[in-house]
């Protein structure tokens, strides 16, 4: 049986967030159950790209600050680290725009640049990963995911948030190597197992619906959730959004590998009843339609359907970041505008995540995979 603590928190007001985070952890026995005095604690927020907190893309800085406060209250040494895919314009912009830099300065927490700190070679089955050294060297890792949909994997939460422990272009390489969501989710689960975070605290105050994780629609979902089992946390969050049990590949695969609990029957909720919390008319990603089609029909027509990234030329400034971040070189910059070759595209959404203008969106198209 896994346990997930849930507290309602309707806005990012400092006193409210600090109280809510404290209550959330108190129900799990308090921060002292996870961190001891003198331990180094790496906090891993979702710093997807250089977005400001109220765009709903990144973990809100007040959640990070409240968690640092908790860690420091029991004598832990707080570190903050992430490796965002959208850092091609400089990682400093990400730290600044997300508000994490200010939190670090205010609290004395140490910012860890995963790219600069070296890596540690870790093996999971046949795969070899170069994980950020600080992630493997910290005494404790605390994961701070954001509640969002994802156009490729359908959902992003605790398990997927740890993808950022792979520094630099490795992330694009694994996207290229595993273009199918099911195969890619096995990578996510490998990393989840290797990182072995002790606690997961999800920022679900302002979430994202539709075609997340960067250009979906903001949605005030008003919740904070936490537990030591990130798979159970994801199972609960996915349920509240409206996904079916085990619909999300990463949750199902992690549970099959006994890394966590995916069945709601075996998850104890500390807080309001789940049925009172389900988000009404929550918009799921367009790609989900393809997943719902029976396998025989997918074999027949499924390949004709494709959720394509498209550029909005009104918003696009022609910076070229999307073209440089595409792992399969499917984007050419022609007259300072990105032109996407859908025949090459593996739908990893790196371009969508890294575009500073939010100019890449997702559109369900017929036959685009064949005719570009
Ligand atoms: S879509 Fe335009 S603004 Fe966005 S990353 Fe590509 S070139 Fe830059
Ligand atoms: S065009 Fe965008 S979604 Fe397609 S492979 Fe390139 S980065 Fe990924």
Image: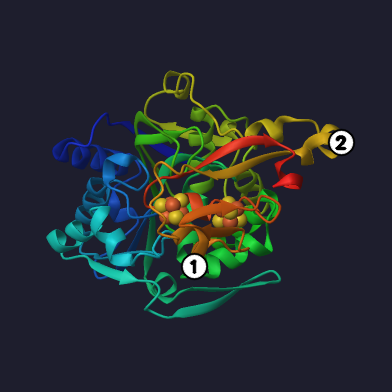
Q: Residue at x 33, y 67 (%)?
A: 90
In percent of width and height, residue 294 lies at 80, 31
Q: How many marks?
A: 2
Q: Which residue is mark 2?
A: 300
In the rendered structure, the answer to whether residue 206 lies left or right of residue 312 reads: left
Mark 2 vs ligand 2: CB below 8 Å: no
Q: Residue at x 46, y 23 (%)?
A: 278
Nearest to the observer: residue 33 or residue 106:
106
In percent of width and height, residue 279 lies at 45, 23
How many residues crowd around disc 1 within 10 Å: few (fewer than 14), some, or many (20 or more)? many
Asked whether disc 1 touches disc 2, contact meaning CB atoms under 8 Å apart, the reply is no
Q: Secondary structure at mark 2?
A: helix
Q: Quadrant of the N terminus?
A: top right
Rendering quarter of residue 86: bottom left
Is 28 situated above or below 69?
above
How many residues crowd around disc 2 within 10 Å: few (fewer than 14), some, or many (20 or more)? few
Nearest to the observer: residue 363 or residue 96:
363
In percent of width and height, residue 270 lies at 39, 32
In the rendered structure, the answer to whether residue 199 lies left or right of residue 194 reads: left
Q: Earlier in the sequence, mark 1 or mark 2?
A: 1
Is 337 situated above or below 212?
below
Nearest to the observer: residue 355 or residue 136:
355
**Residue placed furthest toward the front:** 335
Quadrant of the rendered image holding ligand 2: bottom right
In percent of width and height, residue 160 lies at 51, 52
C-alpha span from label 1 to label 2 = 37 Å
Nearest to the observer: residue 84 or residue 357:
357
Is 89 situated above or below 222?
below
Q: Residue at x 61, y 60 (%)?
A: 175
Q: Secondary structure at mark 1?
A: loop
Rendering quarter of residue 6: top left
Q: Which residue is mark 1?
A: 166
């Amino acid at each position: 049986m896994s346990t997930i603590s849930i507290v309602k928190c309707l806005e990012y007001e400092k006193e409210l967030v600090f109280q809510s985070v404290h209550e959330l952890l108190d129900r799990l026995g308090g921060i002292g159950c996870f961190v001891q005095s003198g331990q180094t604690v790496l906090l891993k927020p979702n710093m997807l790209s250089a977005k400001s907190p109220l765009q709903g893309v990144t973990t809100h800085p007040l959640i990070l600050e409240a968690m640092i406060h908790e860690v420091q209250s029991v004598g832990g040494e707080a570190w903050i680290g992430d490796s965002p895919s959208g850092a091609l314009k400089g990682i400093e912009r990400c730290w600044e725009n997300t508000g994490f830099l200010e939190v670090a300065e205010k609290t004395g927490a140490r910012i860890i640049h995963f790219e600069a700190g070296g890596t540690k070679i870790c093996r999971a089955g046949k795969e070899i990963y170069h994980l950020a050294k600080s992630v493997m060297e910290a005494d404790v890792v605390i994961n701070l995911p954001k509640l969002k949909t994802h156009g490729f994997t359908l959902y992003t939460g605790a398990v997927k948030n740890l993808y950022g422990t792979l520094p630099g272009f490795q992330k694009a390489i694994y996207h290229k190597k595993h273009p199918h969501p099911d195969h890619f989710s096995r990578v996510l689960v490998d990393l989840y197992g290797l990182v072995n975070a002790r606690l997961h605290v999800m920022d679900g105050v302002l979430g994202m619906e539709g075609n997340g994780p960067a250009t979906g629609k903001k949605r005030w979902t008003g919740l904070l959730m936490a537990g030591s089992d990130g798979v159970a946390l994801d199972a609960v969050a996915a349920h509240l959004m409206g996904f079916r049990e085990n619909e999300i590949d990463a949750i199902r695969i992690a549970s099959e590998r006994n890394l966590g609990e995916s069945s709601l029957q075996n998850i104890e909720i500390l807080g309001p009843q789940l049925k009172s919390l389900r988000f009404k008319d929550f918009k799921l990603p367009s790609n989900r339609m393809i997943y719902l089609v029976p396998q025989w029909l997918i074999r027949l027509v499924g390949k004709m359907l494709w959720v394509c990234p498209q550029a909005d030329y009104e918003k696009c400034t022609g910076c070229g970041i999307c073209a440089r971040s595409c792992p399969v070189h499917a984007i050419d910059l022609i007259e300072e505008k990105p032109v996407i070759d859908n025949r090459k595209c593996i739908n990893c959404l790196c371009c969508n995540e890294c575009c500073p203008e939010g100019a890449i969106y997702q559109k369900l198209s017929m036959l685009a995979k064949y005719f570009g």
